[in-house]
Amino acid sequence: MADRIQAVLDKESSRIVGRFMKDVDLFGGIKEVCKRFDLEAAQFQCIGSLSHATYVQLEKTSEGVLQYSKKIISDSPVELLSGTGFVGLGSDGELDVHFHGMFVDCHQQISGGHFLDGENPVAITIEFILFPLKDIELKRGNDLYSNLPVFQFSMKE
């Protein structure tokens, strides 16, 4: 898939820009670019199209507890109108992506949510910009209040 990923570094701003071509997974592409440029922490934004979107949305139980919905898969290709996320390390020490996006589907319905790893293939193109965080460590750890695994932000030692 490396031949389906374009990524260049703007040395003056230290930002990486590029695009993913058809069938590249959104998260897989972001992780590949981070590996190429030796990044373990970054913020990113993207727009483009996906063959389908796979995501979850926040919901509240009857007891008032916040949780994620069951996995939702769009029934058509989607145009990603806005997407933003962070790259850090998972509890296993491997690159991990946290991404939220808003999209419009082929029925002109707008939706969005928390996208899932490995399940969002590019339809035509995804254009992205990565903002490397060289002195910051992002690592998954359980939130004190929800006990969900979220990125913890700290300075690198």
Image: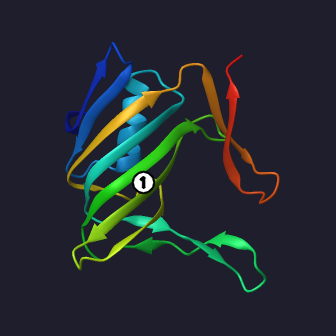
Seen in the picture, residue 51 relative to 41 is either above or below; the reply is: below
Taking the image as drawn, is residue 95 in sight?
Answer: no
Which residue is at a point 30% across and 56% down the rendered structure image? 121
Q: In this view, does 5 lie to the left or right of 82?
A: left
Q: Residue 42 at x, y = what percent? A: 49, 32
Extreme residue in the left direction = 124
Q: What element carries label 1?
A: loop
Q: In this view, does 100 lie to the left or right of 61?
A: left
Which residue is at a point 33% across and 46% down the rendered structure image? 46
Q: Which quarter shows the C terminus?
A: top right
Q: In this view, does 151 lie to the left or right of 31?
A: right
Q: Counting other residues with Cα less than 10 Å from the Cα at mark 1, is it few (<14), some (14-19), or many (20 or more)?
A: few
For mark 1, what is the residue? 118
Between 97 and 91, the one lying in front of the other is: 97
Q: Residue 37 at x, y = what percent? A: 40, 21
Q: Residue 93 at x, y = what percent? A: 63, 34
Seen in the picture, residue 51 relative to 29 is either above or below; the reply is: below
Between 74 and 63, the one lying in front of the other is: 63
Q: Residue 59 at x, y = what percent? A: 62, 75
Extreme residue in the right direction = 144
Between 40 and 12, the one lying in front of the other is: 12
Instruction: Tell me where residue 137 sits by quadrant.
Output: top right
Instruction: Tell me where residue 108 sits by quadrant.
Output: bottom left
Which residue is at a point 77% across and 60% down the rendered structure image? 146
Which residue is at a point 69% across and 51% down the rendered structure image? 149
Q: Which quarter shows the N terminus?
A: top left
